Amino acid sequence: MSQAVSYSVQDKIGVISVNNPPVNALAQRVREGILKSIQAAQRDDSEAVILACEGRTFIAGADITEFNKPPKEPGLPEVLSALENSSKPVIAAIHGTALGGGFEVALACHYRCAVASAKVGLPEVKLGLLPGAGGTQRLPRIAGVKAALDIITSGNPVPAGKAHDMGLVNEIIEGDLLEGARRYARDLVDSGAPLKRIRDVVIDPDTIEPGFFEQARKRVNARARGQIAPDRIVSCLEAAVSLPIDQALERERELFRELVTSPESAAMRHIFFAERQAAKIKGLPRETSQRDISQAAIIGGGTMGGGIAMCFANAGIPVILLEVSDEALDRGMKIIRKNYGITVKRGKLGEEDVKQRMGLITGTTDYADIAHADIVIEAVFENLELKKEIFAKLDQTCKPGAILATNTSYQDVDAIAAATGRPEDVLGTHFFSPANVMRLLEVVRGEKTADDALATAMRIGKRIGKVCALSGVCYGFIGNRMLTGYGREAQLLLLEGCTPQQVDSTLEQFGMAMGPVAMGDLAGLDVGYKARQSRGTTGDDPRPYAISTRLVESGRHGQKTGAGYYRYDSETRRRIPDPEVEAMIREEAEKFGIARREISAQEIIARCLYPLVNEGAKILEEGIAQRASDVDVVYVFGYAFPVAKGGPMFYADRVGLKRVYEQILEFQRQHGETNWRPANLLKELAESGGSFAEWDRRQA
Ligand code: 3HC
Ligand code: NAI
């Protein structure tokens, strides 16, 4: 028997116990162990068999690291057949998360019991895959086709209680899982319960509304952003209705094989591991001591402060919001309440939850009230002098050891830290808007930030549901610094011959959630305009701002005024191309003496995305980001870069760094050195046939 799986019989109940830390993934030795155990169970005196797991969770899926390697026997379908065809009832006993192949194992068992805190789900779609071991066939047979489609295309886990109501779990166990499972198994045996094989359930095609699958396909493809798995999942569910189970399982297998070798899944698996790597700080051992965080405080209850306060309250951490005046505080609290209200309306939260969360947020205008906070996050206006003033005050007020964080987008974290007598406690926590929704958190390490403060910030980020990436101090940190070139090139392309819709639709077809021009309209063109006015534009190249300046000065501030680069339908907010803007763009181009020309989709992509790659490489060279994969995490979780492309650095590796580098040199010849100086690292990797992935491995 393999060490990862053990089998024993007690009181005529066999127990197959999986022990493959950290998440009991279905590595080859686990598959083999389960197979041998269930075979042994057929020959012994057990009357029923429980399949349970040790450690923190039930089986969390196939071993994702095995997908790149040649398959090893036994395959998962073979193991599941053996469980399903057992002559004795097999009962899955679930705690933690039964995910993917793990839930498929449970679905091949005759019965499923779970503790109330457990969750079940088929998250394969998040890896660009579909459940490849019968999940698309067994789940609709017990949950119904519509519910199965929702679960499999969303990939979201279902809590045990709901799973029980849906019939996915037969019994909820109170108290010790294994003891409860033994009792349940004994009851099943004593009552002569049948061997319930989900595969024997037949779905009546007449229960499916005509056009159901066409509509489902349309719906999933409309939001696929380059992912092909949702479409293939619909095909599998169609097969569940129209084909006998063995043929349908074969179809599922075939489509799984297509996906597992697809570039989309490779990219999404890259992001899965990149996300987990990004949480690790190089040179800092896992056991670095951490500070206790049980009370948070936020300075400034505006757009960001309010959202950040919600993040803490959502995680059950009490938070005090400090504002300049009672009016400002009221305004901030009202916005928080309104935002929670929207979540309730969408059915994602109950009134009771909101009450409880609002109860965790208190307001003040007095610094004395935040003296005991374990972490303070400043989110006032983006003004260095104001931030320094606030940090000096925090230094005087806050208890020793409190983490003092700034949410600044661009300011120098070291200068802010220097306003205190305890720079070791100061760091950046750069949230993204809306802070209660966007997953990314850039944790900014100042020159003097203490290791334990940093480790605590990374951990608290995870606790409040964020994906953390570490950045060094520089203007704009990782994400915003890279964004400069992306926005600039989009604007230059307009002057050189593109229409706004051409730039946006090309990048949206590539997979971006929204093109850069439409994004400007959404954010408000007046924001950048005001920032430019206050900074003064002397010395800057005026071309990237010419069109938006003109739009703002003619009252077109973007979506909020009903017009910007586009006009907006007042009801639906649908964007409508505007010939007036196109004329404006032509005039501006003429002023700069730019001859307009036809521009291909390929050029639009290279012009907008290669600056991300090039700046990303400079950021790596300078040690601002720890890994190329961290840069990918920043772009996928903070800037809605398509996960099916794996982030800008992974994408560049796919294109080939030599090709990217040569194209940048070509752009340099056409457009000059200022905007197109290739990063030394890019040059070096391109010339040596290297890749960012390989660079990451070398630096690990
Ligand atoms: N295979 C290999 N490694 C895995 C893994 C898997 N399925 N799931 C998690 N791990 C690794 C992580 O990479 C991480 O490694 P590290 O410590 O070296 O960074 C470690 O396990 C712990 O993972 P987390 O940090 O994510 O731990 P959490 O406790 O936060 O979360 C979890 C646990 C909810 C199980 C989460 O890890 C998760 O969602 N895992 C993936 C689940 C999944 O996608 N399953 C489907 C796989 S595909 C499949 O099953 C195909 C089938 O249909 C044929
Ligand atoms: P905002 O203008 O919406 O809110 C700022 C709040 O700070 C206001 O409510 C104001 O009353 C309050 N305030 C001002 N001075 C204060 C003081 N002395 N003490 C207490 N409160 C004070 O600004 P926003 O957008 O929330 O930005 C805050 C910070 O977050 C800035 O540094 C910004 O660069 C950064 N940021 C903003 C993002 C965005 O998309 N809005 C994204 C990421 C970071």
Image (cartoon, rainbow, N blue to C red):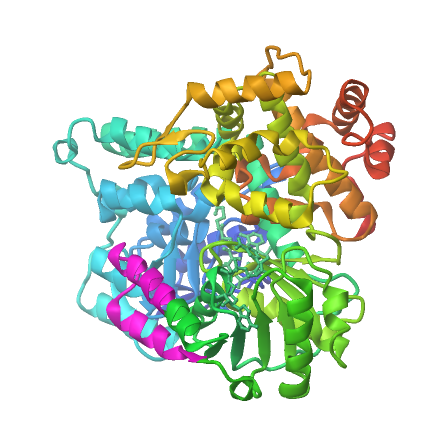
Q: Using the rendered view, name the quadrant where residue 158 is placed.
A: bottom left
Q: Is residue 187 above or below residue 69?
A: below
| Residue 687 place in picture, x, y as percent | 87, 28
Q: Is residue 62 above or below residue 226?
A: below
Residue drawn at 66 percent across, 78 percent down: 290
Quarter of the rendered image showing ligand 1: bottom right
The answer to which of 177 and 308 lies nearer the viewer is 308
Q: In screen coordinates, is 499 left or right of 538?
A: left
Considering every residue shown, the one lying at the far left of the view is 206
Name the dominant secondary structure of the magenta segment: helix
- Residue 256 x, y percent position in the rendering: 46, 34
Q: Residue at x 70, y 73 (%)?
A: 426
Residue at position x 45%, y 30% from top? 228
Q: Is residue 578 visible?
A: yes
Residue 211, image quadrant: top left
Based on the picture, tell me whether residue 337 belongs to the magenta stretch. Answer: yes
* Residue in front for this viewpoint, 628 or 352: 352
Residue at (80% x, 31% y) in the render:
674
Pick the front one: 679 or 388: 388
* Residue 187 falls within the magenta-colored stretch: no
Give residue 546's position: percent from left, percent from top: 61, 30
| 299 horizontally vs 447: left or right | left
What span is colored magenta in the figure?
A: 334-363
